[in-house]
Amino acid sequence: MKRAIPAVISAATALTLVLGGCGGGDEPVDPNAPVTITLAGWSLASTPEFKTLADGFKATHPNVTVELKEYAPGNDYDTQMITDLAAGTAPDVYVMKNLKNFYTYQSGGQLLDVSDATTDLGSSPALASYQVDGKAYAVPYRQDSWVLYYNKDLFAKAKVPLPDGSWTWDDYTDAAKRLHTGLKGAGSNATGAYQHTFQSTVQGFALAQTPNADLLSGDFGFLKPYYERSLDLQASGAQPTFGTAKTNKLTYQAQFGKQQSAMLLMGTWYVATLLNQRKSGDADKFQWGMAPAPQFDKSTTGTSATPVTFGDPTGLGINPKISKSKAAVAKDFLKYAAGPEAGKALAGIGITPAQATDAVTASLFGLDGVPQDELSKFAYAKHTIKPENPVSKHTAGLQNLLNETHSTILSDSKGVDAALSEAQTRAKNEVLNQ
């Protein structure tokens, strides 16, 4: 792989990243001495996975404390992390929320070679995403997939049949509209669906499901039908508009958890959040379920088929400025986080670990509050997952550009054809020629 910094990172920042990549002390190593390593996380109050990993590692390594450092959620996480890495103030271990910026971190010299921490991980596709020239620069500890969450109580109130695993996007659109009408008739203000402002909610599915779609080709025509359906749902009132969600800072957790919308397309990480918020009172208690995400066509629908969805692995890497005395401990932490014991612990709080086994599925569905119907188990366990962010020097630049296109289209600032045509021109001139 050729090393280059994507266009989205300024030359000054890129230089800082590269220069900042060297470091590490030379302290003597005492394996029994107390050690503290720091770990980046976000939204610690509602995202229990980081504490779960820290506590689990402490149980088998009593002399090691994993101290959490909280970062901003969403896209701001990477912005803040890149700044801290350049400034030399980043934690010892940090999370790659998805694959979008892995190339930036790795090519910028901001990830330690952790190949010796991956010997027990086999040749999983998730690990392959983090390998460059035969070396691994991160380990996967989560592998989420996107599914359809639905509120059974609101479906009943609207008198709309529940999802059965056979839905294409046309079926989903029809159900959202019927839910909107039915709920309104029943005196409810809930909408049929909520589509969060993430570009993933449209582009992730379009890229994963459309035959021959290729993000790196610069041809974005595959996005058109997915945006046309979103605009149709907005215009019908079946889901809040993009502008409403942005202006009122709507959260998907509140929209679904407080029963403001009957359906939500989101990653499986939301299971843990929903369970946690039901306990804290930040979410209502109601009957809910999971179904496969709507499909491109009927060929991948039904429980005898394998639905197609998307999801990047979530990985852990080590700051190369970590001292030598802590580097071995940090690698042990990565081994633990990507291994079976951490997998059980993560499943025990509703998180999908990178190594999803039948035991993991059984553990997650044994949690209080998780639906027990067969379709939910099918949606969670069986699917083809395609990456949202194929690893490339162009990925971050293209995704940043397409995020602007996403806002332009859903805010009705420009028509779908014109916006996609502009995106293709910009991709060719601003990213793909770099």
Image (tube, rainbow, N blue to C red):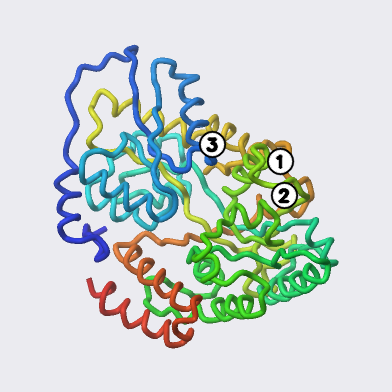
3D distance between C-alphas at marks 1 and 2: 8 Å
Question: Given this view, does label 1 or label 3 mark the residue nearer the observer?
Answer: 3
Q: Which residue is identified by label 1?
A: 365
Residue 408 in percent (x, y) is at 44, 77
Q: Residue visible at 19% across and 55% down?
A: 14
Q: Residues within 10 Å of mark 3 (few under 14, many from 20)?
A: some
| Contact check, label 1 and label 2, Cβ < 8 Å | yes
Residue 305 in percent (x, y) is at 70, 63
The amino acid beneath tag 2 is Lys
Residue 62 in percent (x, y) is at 44, 16
Left or right relative to 118: residue 291: right
3D distance between C-alphas at marks 1 and 3: 18 Å
**Residue 73 to residue 32: above or below:** below
Looking at the image, is mark 2 or mark 3 earlier in the sequence?
3
Q: Residue visible at 70% across and 36% down?
A: 367
SS category of the residue bearing label 3 = loop
430 and 380: which is toward the camera: 430
Quadrant of residue 353 within the rendered picture: top right
- Screen quadrant of the C terminus: bottom left
Quadrant of residue 366 within the rendered picture: top right
SS category of the residue bearing label 1 = helix
Q: Residue visible at 53% across and 67% down?
A: 208
Residue 48 marker? 3
Q: Residue visible at 21% across and 39% down?
A: 88
Q: Which residue is identified by label 2?
A: 377
The amino acid beneath tag 3 is Pro
Question: Given this view, does label 2 or label 3 mark the residue nearer the observer?
Answer: 3
Report if residue 358 is visible in the image.
Answer: no
